[in-house]
Amino acid sequence: MPRIGDSAPDFVADALLCGAPSRVHLAEYRGQWVVLFFIVGDYTCVCLTEIAAVAVKYPAFRELGTEILAVSVDPIATHRRLCEETLQSTIPGGARFPLISDGEGAIGRLFGVYDDEQRRHLRSHFVIDPDGVIQGVEMLGAPIGRSVSELLRQIRALKAYRDTGRFAPCGWEPGKPTLSDADVTDSPEKVWDIWRPGKAF
């Protein structure tokens, strides 16, 4: 599995984008943030909630200069049914980000998240920076859905660090204090002058 600081493995794949067949080439997203969002399957109960939540918050991702690339083993026809019959009835515009078909698990294997026995992806995602470097990885068991709000928070924190070089402590949100290495050079107690546990929540 690629680790934090590794270059994200490149790939080209078929996808559905806004109802039309498309080709996705990861390298073409250089210059912006990318969340490579692996789901177990379009119509597993938890994945359906995740895709819907990402669809609702997609404008917030775009405001952060971030693209979502959702990946499952489902064929394009299933992605189309998901968009046209399921999502658009409850979410205006449905999924406006690429839904990638990785039927043989080639992309999942590149990223170390394809389960050969189950023939599906593990619930996971990778946050990739504008230079194509992996800056975040999360993996959860199939019964547990991810928090889209937390994913947005992580991207805001990563962007802030990239812009300022200052570190985001636990629970950081825009407007909260940041830290630097200098804050603990002489004594870790210096952190308490800036940050208290209550700021994590």
Image (cartoon, rainbow, N blue to C red):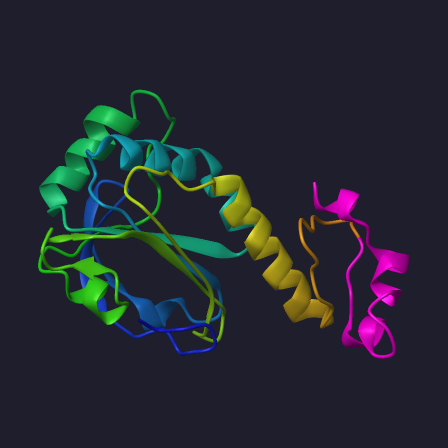
Indicate the position of residue 62 as horizontal and vertical percent values.
Answer: 50, 49
Task: Name the residue at the top extreme.
Answer: 89
Q: Is residue 62 magenta?
A: no
Depth order, front residue of 73/67: 73
Residue 53 figure quarter = top left
Depth order, front residue of 30/5: 5
Indicate the position of residue 88 as horizontal and vertical percent values.
Answer: 30, 26
- Left/right placement of residue 199 relative to residue 34 reads right
Q: Give the range drawn in magenta.
A: 177-201
In this rendering, the answer to whether 200 lies above or below 1 is above
Task: Name the residue at the right extreme.
Answer: 193
- Left/right placement of residue 29 relative to residue 107 reads right
Residue under the point 40% across and 73% down: 3
Indicate the position of residue 104 as horizontal and vertical percent values.
Answer: 9, 60
Indicate the position of residue 158 as horizontal and vertical percent values.
Answer: 60, 62
Considering the image in quadrants, where does the N terminus appear? bottom left
In this rendering, the answer to whether 198 lies above or below 32 is above
- Left/right placement of residue 63 relative to residue 112 reads right
- Left/right placement of residue 114 relative to residue 51 reads left
Residue under the point 10% across and 47% down: 75
Considering the image in quadrants, where does the C terminus appear? top right
Specify whether residue 37 is in view.
no
Residue 168 figure quarter = bottom right
Residue 164 figure quarter = bottom right
Residue under the point 23% across and 71% down: 110
Q: Does the magenta stretch include residue 185?
A: yes
Specify whether residue 26 is in view.
yes
Depth order, front residue of 15/106: 106
